[in-house]
Image: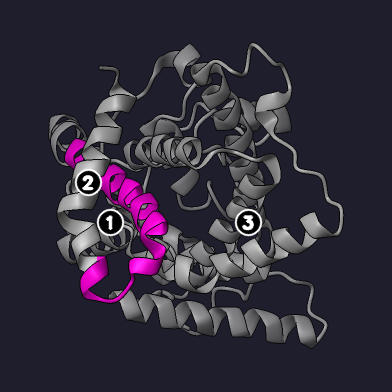
Amino acid sequence: MNPMHWFDAAQQALFEAVVQPLMFEFGQAGILAEGFHATGWLLVGLLQIVVMLTFFRALERWRPVEPVTDRAAVRVDIAYTLLHRLGLFRVVMFFTVDPLWDTLVGALRVAGLPTWSLDGLWPGVTDIALVSFLLYLVLFDFVDYGLHRAQHRFDWWWQLHAVHHSQRQMTMWSDNRNHLLDDLLRDSLFVLVALAVGIPPGQFIAVVAVAQLVESLAHANVRLSFGSLGERLLVSPRFHRVHHGIGVGHESAGPGSLGGHNFAVLFPVWDAIFGTGRWYDAPGPTGIRDQLPEFGGRDYGRGFWAQQWRGVQRLVGARERERRGGSGAPAGPSASGT
């Protein structure tokens, strides 16, 4: 039995033993198909957490970049990870935003928008499951690279994405430390792309699962490089830590500037093509420049809800600056902690 068959069998067992009875109990029998689909996300999340707690944690103990002194901040990151990897955020998306996109795409289909599938580009070749999967993986990684650059390019979006970069104790749990509005926007755009290219649901889960697992490794507190060639093939913890470096991954042109380096999520080839890669910087302190006392000591929030609220305040401030006709640059080091 190949791995996909093992996964399908485990998904079916988990659905029948746990999810389906709960759906009947709460009167959700009308959406059993969607519940089965959600069980796939739950199973993937559980498998990811197992890998993180075993393999990735062993790497962090083996060669940590720095000692973890702020364990409270890491615990908040763990809460973010459980929220996303166990499917709670996706359930909210399913009942709120996803129906809007389904309605929109359905209306476009009725209006004559043709149904298109990336699998049909090379019949006979893309029919092979592995080839099809790799094709979708490269496509969505390119989309992710573009979205990541946008998060650092537009002031209003950066004010949300800054929640992710404000973690100064990076660990394998830091990947999902994001503002919920940031995740909502990014995931919605991903869903629209998925609907546009016709990726099968199973393939979509697999693509997202692989990307998330590599991202968790990339954020790990481990002194690990893949070598001069490997660093250009797959994002490593060293490569991505440069992206989080103070004044490197963001504000690389000086305090308050937008931009940065090393935006790739899986494949650094995008940074090589578009000139945003930095391969030779030594890992240093992570965070945002205006968190430092000499640059104002801005407070990005300690707890989950404080981080979410301050992100909203920063977003409102960014929109107000645009309304007043500002240049779009973020507020300088003297800005308040909001």
- Amino acid type at image mark 1: Leu
Tell me, yes or no, whether the two marked residues, 1 and 3, touch with CB atoms within 8 Å: no
**Which of disc 3 and disc 1 is earlier in sequence?**
1
Boundaries of the magenta span: 23-52
Locate residue 150, reporting x and y percent: 67, 55
Q: Tag 1's secondary structure?
A: loop
Q: Which residue is mark 3?
A: 189
Residue closer to the observer: 59 or 141 = 141
Q: Tell me the residue at 55%/80% (across/down).
A: 314
Locate residue 226, reporting x and y percent: 39, 19
Predominant SS of the magenta segment: helix
**Is 36 covered by the magenta stretch?**
yes
> Hey, what amino acid is under mark 2?
Leu
Q: Nearer the viewer, residue 310 or 95?
A: 95
State the CA–CA distance, disc 1 to disc 2.
7 Å
SS at badge 3: helix
Q: Are the two marked residues, 1 and 2, in contact with CB atoms closer than 8 angstroms?
A: yes
List x then y, in percent, for residue 58. 13, 32
Report the disc number at residue 86. 1
Q: Is residue 246 left or right of residue 216?
A: right
Q: CA distance from mark 1 to mark 3?
A: 21 Å
